[in-house]
Amino acid sequence: MPRSGKRRLFFGLWPDDDLRTRVVRATRAEVRGTGGKPTPPENLHMTLHFLGPTPEELIHPLIERVSALPLDPFELALEQYGYWQRARTLWLGPNETPLPLAELARDIGRISHELGLPRNRRAFIPHMTLARKVNRLTPREPPRPLHWPVNEFVLVESVLGGRHSRYTILEHFD
């Protein structure tokens, strides 16, 4: 744990190994074409709500409150590429956000704010980061949809350092 007594956390959707493999295969040419730094397959995920540095004493109340949220299983179709120019990031996401996903992200944000954590000012755009430090974009044909049955979400600790962040799942919610 960092000396500050805070842990860098986020809530997210965590794909299984099969979906990770399918994402990597389906997007390999697109990612290579960017000249960017690919996201390691084991780090592929979809962030629901980034908490950032979270005081240790808030983690248990956060888990307790979020555990009470209902999760209606839904299917997510990963079917479009996106690019954030300022961040030089290529991503994969749905054309439309399923209502249960939007509600889950909103409710997690509300709970974290009620517990005194800073409000996330960015609009929720569901995406899976494929590459960072993108140098160029190739013509992006939409990928064939990759279907992701979602029936759980996770609380993850992110530790910065080395070549990539290291993620550890702290809690599963279903």
Image (cartoon, grey):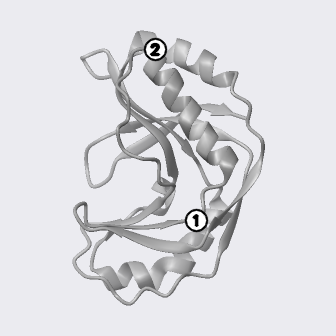
Mark 1: few/some/many CA within 10 Å (<14, 14-19, 20+): many
Of 172 and 102, the residue lying toward us: 102
Of 78 and 99, the residue lying toward us: 99
Q: Considering only vertical position in the picture, is 115 above or below 125?
A: above
Q: In the image, residue 151 lies at what x, y percent?
A: 74, 45
Q: Is residue 109 left or right of residue 73?
A: left
Q: In the image, residue 79 lies at what x, y percent?
A: 59, 73
Mark 2: few/some/many CA within 10 Å (<14, 14-19, 20+): few
Give the residue type at disc 1.
Answer: Pro
**Residue in the image at 49% along x and 88% along y:** 141
Q: Considering only vertical position in the picture, is 96 above or below 57?
A: below
Q: Is residue 144 left or right of residue 28?
A: right
Residue linked to disc 1: 94
Of 114 and 146, the residue lying toward us: 114
> Across the whole image, how many numbered discs are drawn on residues?
2
Of 13 and 116, the residue lying toward us: 116
Give the residue type at disc 2.
Answer: Leu
Q: Residue 115: which numbered mark, if any? A: 2
Quadrant showing the N terminus? top left
Q: Residue 1: which numbered mark, if any? A: none
Q: Is residue 28 left or right of residue 86?
A: right
Which of pointers 2 and 1 lies earlier in the amino acid sequence? 1
Q: Considering only vertical position in the picture, is 122 above or below 138?
A: above
**Residue in the image at 39% along x and 38% along y:** 158
Element carrying mark 2: loop
